[in-house]
Amino acid sequence: MMALLEVEDLHVAYGKIEAVKGISFAVEQGQIVTLIGTNGAGKTTTLRTISGLLRPSAGKISFEGKPIHSVPAHRIVQLGLAHSPEGRHIFPRMTIEENLLLGAYLRKDQKVGEDMAKAYAMFPILGERRSQAAGTLSGGEQQMLAIARALMCKPRLLMLDEPSMGLSPIMMQLIMTTIQELKSAGTTILLVEQNAQAALSLADHGHVLEVGRIALSGRGSDLMHDEQVRKTYLGEE
Ligand code: ATP
């Protein structure tokens, strides 16, 4: 079966500094694939390159079998690849509803209202507060809004960068449950996380990034039980 997303020998540099040094992985339809690793490993750089916000210095990225590494970012969104960035980047002075509409601005179909209703059904707090400024939401609620906004472009692949960052344990659990629900509803997800435990417990497949290279790959459940992963990323002796 052809993978939905295929990354082959990807290299990305900031000037002379190579942040991603030849990584390869694939995401199959319906899977959750996670990239874990410490600060600076190259996870965000990888997602931003897939989204077309950065250009690779070498390598290939294919989406549904077609190369996308030279395609402009707005076209990549139209192809069905949505990116919920690290730090959420919601627009705090705009209402929740306006933030959601921005997620749909490239759509030309008439079903935006239907999908807005779905977003409110999934995250009732967003519906209750739809006319309020997004900046009044808590951190966890803003993360919900960032995910809901990414879903408003009806993605074939949803990329989430550190969705648990800065959240309380309860909110983090809620976000992880949401990701599991999205998968059950058929959404394919590429998840970047520093919270390795949470990410691996959800993922079909995981890749451990270390300074721009994939150090280890495997099924989420296998990596969770790997001794090296447990020591390095799950804080166990
Ligand atoms: P984090 O969890 O901290 O975001 P990460 O795994 O996502 O870590 P990246 O943000 O992709 O890592 O960073 C990879 C490397 O590239 C790091 O060494 C970082 O300092 C460097 N880097 C990231 N952004 C830039 C930039 N705009 N200019 C120069 N170097 C950068």
Image: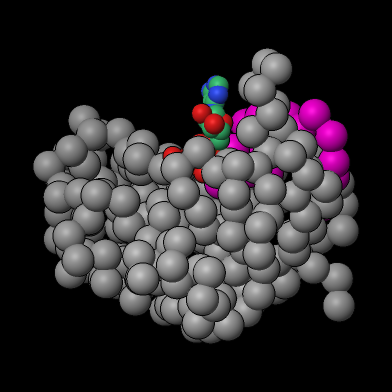
Task: In the rendered view, tell whether residue 30 sits above or below residue 107.
Answer: below
Measuring 58% from the left and 82% from the top, which residue is drawn there? 222
Count of numbered marks: 0
Q: Residue at x 83, y 47 (%)?
A: 9
Read off the magenta span.
43-62
Find residue 217 and report its horizontal and vertical position in percent.
67, 68
The residue lying furthest to the front in this view is 237
Residue 14 in percent (x, y) is at 64, 22
Quadrant in the rendering for residue 86: top left
Q: Is residue 165 visible?
A: yes
Residue drawn at x 60%, y 42% as measured from the top left: 211
Q: Is residue 99 magenta?
A: no
Residue 187 x %, y %: 56, 71
Residue 110 visible to the viewer? no
Residue drawn at (75%, 63%), measured in percent from left and top? 26
Residue 68, quarter of picture: top right
Residue at the top extreme, as displayed? 15
